[in-house]
Amino acid sequence: MKVSIIIPAYNEKRTLENLVDQINRIRLALEKEIIVVDDGSSDSTRALVKALEERGAVTACFHEQNQGKGAAVRTGLKKASGDIILIQDADLEYDPADYPKLIQPIIEKKTRVVYGSRILGKNKASYLRFYYGGRFLSLLANLLYGIHITDEPTCYKVLDAQLMKNLQLESRGFEFCPEVTAKVSRMGEKIVEVPISYRPRSIREGKKIRWTDGLIAIWTLFRYRKWKPGKRLQAVGSRGDS
């Protein structure tokens, strides 16, 4: 088996190489491939991604213009050859050391969907508006879809590859996360959560999510309530930053 690790990257020159090195040091019970999608970065991230590809550390994809996290993930999916898809942010808020426990429930065929929960991990909370925003999205997802999760907006979404590709993802921005939650729930998939480590960063340090992305996430959860496999809706894009 193989896990495909997809990393959307937008202006992440300070953290990306360190992240890739950490991932390559992780020992897993299966093969891994790292796919980095430079989402139209305006700093030197693009050159760094090219250098990482030249040394064989990653598979690289490039957007000429910034399109958003969801668009970057969809581009990465086209390159993915693994049996499991793992989404990794490039900013080092999330620790690759958690990979073994994130993929184990799928390897053991206990589920096809695993979320890494910052809440179960009892980490230092994000800035209050991010913390309460995430808690609200989790409660809303539970209410609308009859599920029981603690961390809907977590970066760590790990899915069976065929399931991921069958979701027919449409989102371009950060609303990628609630789209995945809505669609796997509509398909009757069980979401298993495992506790993870988390080191939040501030907007000054480069955090890109804004309050408007929260509003779009709420709308996304509502709009996919009656989604069925094979049905496509016109996506509502959020800000383009990954």
Image (cartoon, grey):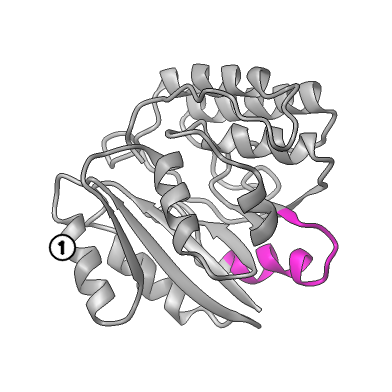
Could one spot residue 160 in this view of the protein? no
**In the rendered image, the vertical position of residue 221 relative to residue 62, given as above or below:** above
**In the rendered image, the vertical position of residue 8 relative to residue 201, given as above or below:** below
User: Which residue occupies 45% across, 63% down?
Assistant: 79
> How many numbered discs sit on the rendered protein?
1
Q: Secondary structure at mark 1?
A: helix
Q: Residue 114: x and y, percent?
A: 71, 54
User: Which residue occupies 47% across, 58% down?
Assistant: 78
- Quadrant hosting residue 104: bottom right
Query: Left or right: where does residue 47 sit relative to residue 35?
Result: left
Q: Would residue 67 be counted in the magenta stretch?
A: no
Q: Residue 137: x and y, percent?
A: 64, 25
Q: Main secondary structure of the magenta part?
A: helix
- Quadrant hosting residue 53: bottom left
Query: Left or right: where does residue 164 sit relative to residue 175?
Result: right
Q: Residue furthest front?
A: 230
Could one spot residue 200 in this view of the protein? yes
**In the rendered image, the vertical position of residue 183 relative to residue 21, given as above or below:** above
Q: Nearer the viewer, residue 203 or 112?
A: 112
* The N terminus - image quarter: bottom right
- Quadrant hosting residue 27: bottom right
Q: Residue 69: x and y, percent?
A: 41, 41
Which segment is the magenta one? 98-113
Q: Tell me the amino acid under the disc marked 1.
A: Ala
